[in-house]
Amino acid sequence: MADPSVCVSLEGTTVKEMLDEAARAGIAGADLIEVRFDRLYLRKPEPTVTENEDGEVTKTMPPASEWPVRDYADIDIEASIASLKDGIALPVIFAARPVREGGHFSGDEDQRIAVLEAGIASGATWVDLEISIDEKIRSKLVKAAKDASCQIVASIHDTDSTPSAEEIQSLITDNADKGDLIKFCGTVNDHQDALQIVEATHAMSTESVNFAAMALGNGGDWARLHAPVLNQTMVYATMRNEFRLSDKGLVNVRDLKEAWNLLEY
């Protein structure tokens, strides 16, 4: 069976960090790069340093949702997109995630739409258009993407929970006409939630729709690790490699490829 494409989602908060991360992701085996343009609006804080009684030093960072956010005007959008276009060799999925779906974009919706339009015009291979975008506005973005031969990720992000397997399956199949690939990302509160994604994707083994399904939280990586036998088209991975990364539902790109080899997928 053919392995799904592996997309590394960049987590840098400056253009320079993103370019460096994208280069390392290519070496690690990524097929695509997701540019999360909304992350440029984050200000990375200094880590909290603690030392236990044995003298071991630990550095911890608060979740990104608690990081300071730059003003919309602080980012030179045109220059940033141009630098990212010139510096990333792999195909790019351009995204500017809104706060309502777990992103960090600091402007209003009209400003975000303008950024997405700029991403499409830049020649990105893919653009991520959330299904929650106003229907009329989304239709215009879809037309712009098609005119630019830019493929569309139609995404759904549930930042509170993970629906039932039947609901996930319906969300994916009912929205199959909204893009070239349907992306669903839920939030796992327990292992039962994680199983819902596995069950939903397993039930879709005979469907012809292109999709990627995953979740954040402990167990959310199960659908990523077993994606080749769950009929998934694409898997989102990370360059992060810290201890207990799986508790966040994430998987390092090298670990993902190694797991597929070990499992003989």
Image: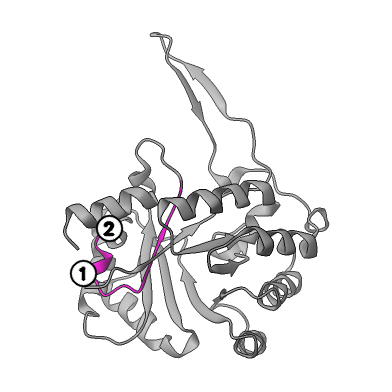
Q: Residues within 10 Å of mark 1 (few under 14, many from 20)?
A: some
Q: For the residue labelled by badge 2, is the local secondary structure a helix, a strand or a loop?
A: helix
Can residue 61 be seen? yes
Up the image or down, 252 lies above or below 169; here it is above
Q: Nearer the viewer, residue 163 or 211?
A: 211
From the image, tell me which residue sits under label 2.
225
Q: Position of residue 157 (x, y in %)?
A: 47, 67
Can residue 14 be seen? no
Which residue range is magenta in the image? 225-239
- Amino acid, disc 1: Val
Q: Position of residue 30 (x, y in %)?
A: 43, 59
Q: Residue at x 71, y 64 (%)?
A: 81
Q: Nearer the viewer, residue 184 or 189?
A: 184
Relative side of 112 to 146, left or right: right
From the image, tell me which residue sits under label 1.
229
Q: Nearer the viewer, residue 122 or 169?
A: 122
Q: Residue at x 43, y 73 (%)?
A: 183
Q: Position of residue 44 (x, y in %)?
A: 64, 40
Q: For the residue labelled by badge 1, is the local secondary structure a helix, a strand or a loop?
A: helix
How far is the residue under mark 1 from the one under mark 2? 9 Å
- Amino acid, disc 2: Leu
Q: Residue at x 46, y 83 (%)?
A: 180
Up the image or down, 259 lies above or below 185; here it is above
The figure's colour scheme reads one colour
Q: Magenta span has 44? A: no
Q: Residues within 10 Å of mark 2 (few under 14, many from 20)?
A: many
